Image (cartoon, rainbow, N blue to C red):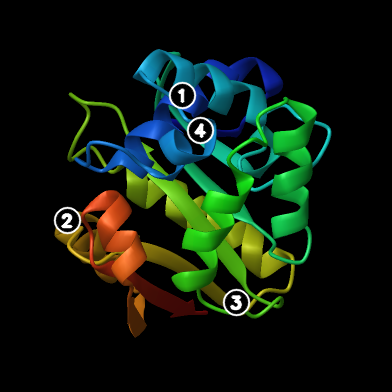
Amino acid sequence: MKIRKALGTDAHFLAQMILQSSRADKQICMFDLIFGSKNSEDTLRNIEKLTTTTAKNHCHYSNFLIAEIDGESVGSLCSYEPRIATREAFLDALKEIDCDDNVEEFLEVLNSCDFELNNRTLVFDFMEEIEGHMDVGILKSLMQKSLLTARLKGYRIAQTMVEIGSLETLLYYKKLGFKEVKQKECELYKEKFGRAGLVLLEYEF
């Protein structure tokens, strides 16, 4: 297995991983809401654009590591710095690709069900692998590499957010050493996506 930094040419694969991670067995996810998409193809196309914008939003390819087996991309993990990949940077990226029509609805959900993240933490997201490659240590290898890089950058705390009810993802993060910090239930989030809210997890190293 090879772990490498993502490139701009990985945009299509990263979009698939971002959508797969965000949907997490739901009918729609936050990106469907943002883009007002009627189908997965439109959502994927717009996420792909997000990964290569000038604005360094959290979906930008430069935040990702990719796992490869025999030259095939099989998994992804995003790690970003909240002080750089800010909410404003994400809104700038949406404007850049002409997809900011539904920003108000997105912000309403975000403001009602979000955690105040410490700018000195590193945030993990979109930890995903393709079907057929489970149990070969892909996610563990991606996380180990990311944590090593984080230590070298001087970080001591990493955080991630998982939906309440995403038991498999929650369990996996806990196996990797993350501990639950708090939960936030949100009626609007439940109304939009059918999940009660979010769980904040933290890893100290």
| Distance from the alpha carbon under mark 1 to that under mark 3 | 27 Å
Q: Nearer the viewer, mark 3 or mark 2?
A: 3
Which label is found at residue 43? 1
- Say which element carries label 4: strand
Which label is found at residue 117? 3
Give whichever of discs 1 and 2 has the lower sequence position. Answer: 1
Q: Are marks 1 and 4 in contact (CB under 8 Å)?
A: no
Give whichever of discs 3 and 4 has the lower sequence position. Answer: 4
| Distance from the alpha carbon under mark 3 to that under mark 4 | 25 Å
Q: Is residue 35 visible?
A: yes
Q: Residue at x 19, y 40 (%)?
A: 25
- Say which element carries label 2: helix
The amino acid type of the residue labelled 2 equals Glu
**56 w.r.t. 203: above or below:** above
Q: Where's residue 1, x and y in %?
A: 40, 30
Give whichever of discs 3 and 2 has the lower sequence position. Answer: 3
Q: Nearer the viewer, mark 1 or mark 4?
A: 1
Q: Where's residue 39, x and y in %?
A: 35, 18
Badge 2: residue crowd in 10 Å (few <14, some 14–19, many ≥20): few
Residue 49 placement, left or right of 88: left
User: Going by the picture, which residue comes out furthest to the bottom?
Assistant: 181
